[in-house]
Image: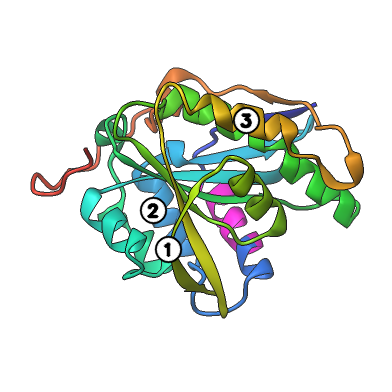
């Protein structure tokens, strides 16, 4: 049995970043120390997938962004590296009211085969949707957006009918930035599209149990101080 949980540790943050660097080489990838600086600001953004022995097998991350930064990215004026900076991330207290939610990476590793890796990544979509429902539920004006970097991601985003917004040079390739303006009505489309999206080679989803608690979901770790928010920066 796999579990989706919020660990909030430096090891998990650095491991996630290292696995991304294995997949996408180049200066555009955040270094482990840089990624940890971001996660440390709001630890509820990184969701680890662990096995029965509590070993990290994958992760997904979701970023609540400040309005100015998100709007510049959606206009194609910022790279993903520039987008994901401590100054552009909403603090745990601000995050609940954040208007712009960036769906980052879904990545599995330490799999026995490529098919097993793809199967686990496909299975992580449902925990991602539950996370969005629990932490960033659909409300008027909220926008989910994403940059598809894999065939599976592109397939799911199109099935959900995200709207193509603009293009961006992404690790040497031109990628499309997609956005989804969430409402209580159309958000049901995400779950329906997930059920309709077939896994690799027809494999059934791997059961993943979501075990995050309310305080961890909100990005607050025991004895962690709330980062100071810039009053001029809006997350709404």
Circles 2 and 3: CB distance less than 8 Å?
no
Split into 4 quadrants, where in the image is the C terminus? top left
Please tell me whether residue 11 belongs to the stretch shown in magenta. yes
Q: Which residue is mark 2?
A: 38
Q: Which secondary structure dominates the residues rendered in magenta?
A: helix
Apparent side of residue 41 relative to residue 59 in the rendered image (left or right): left
Image mark for residue 14: none
Label 2 crowd (10 A; few <14 / some 14-19 / many >=20): many
Numbered label attached to residue 127 = 3
Q: Are marks 1 and 2 in contact (CB under 8 Å)?
A: yes
Rendered location of residue 171, percent (x, y): 56, 75
Q: Quadrant of residue 81?
A: bottom left
Q: Residue at x 86, y 56 (%)?
A: 114
Residue that mark 1 sits on: 34
Q: Earlier in the sequence, mark 3 or mark 1?
A: 1
The magenta stretch is: 10-19
x, y percentage for residue 156? 65, 45
């Amino acid at each position: 049995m796999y579990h989706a949980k919020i660990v909030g540790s430096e090891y998990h943050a650095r491991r996630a970043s290292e696995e991304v660097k294995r997949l996408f080489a180049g200066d555009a990838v955040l270094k482990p120390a840089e990624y940890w600086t971001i996660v440390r600001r709001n630890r509820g953004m990184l969701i680890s997938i662990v096995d029965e022995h509590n070993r990290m097998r994958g992760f997904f991350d979701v970023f609540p962004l400040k309005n100015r930064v998100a709007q510049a990215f959606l206009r194609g004026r910022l790279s993903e590296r520039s987008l994901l900076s401590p100054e552009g991330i909403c603090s745990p207290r601000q995050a609940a009211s954040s208007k712009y939610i960036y769906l980052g990476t879904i990545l599995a590793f330490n799999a026995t085969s490529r098919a097993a890796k793809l199967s686990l990544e496909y299975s992580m979509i449902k925990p991602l949707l539950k996370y969005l429902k629990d932490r960033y539920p659909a409300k008027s004006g909220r926008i989910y957006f994403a940059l598809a970097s894999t065939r599976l991601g592109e397939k799911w985003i199109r099935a959900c009918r995200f709207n193509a917004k603009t293009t961006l040079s992404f690790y040497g390739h031109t990628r499309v930035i997609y956005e989804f303006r969430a409402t209580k009505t159309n958000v049901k489309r995400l779950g329906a599209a997930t059920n309709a999206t077939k896994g690799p080679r027809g494999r059934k989803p791997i059961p993943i149990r979501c075990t995050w608690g309310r305080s961890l979901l909100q990005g607050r770790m025991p004895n962690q101080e709330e980062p100071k928010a810039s009053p001029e920066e809006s997350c709404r």
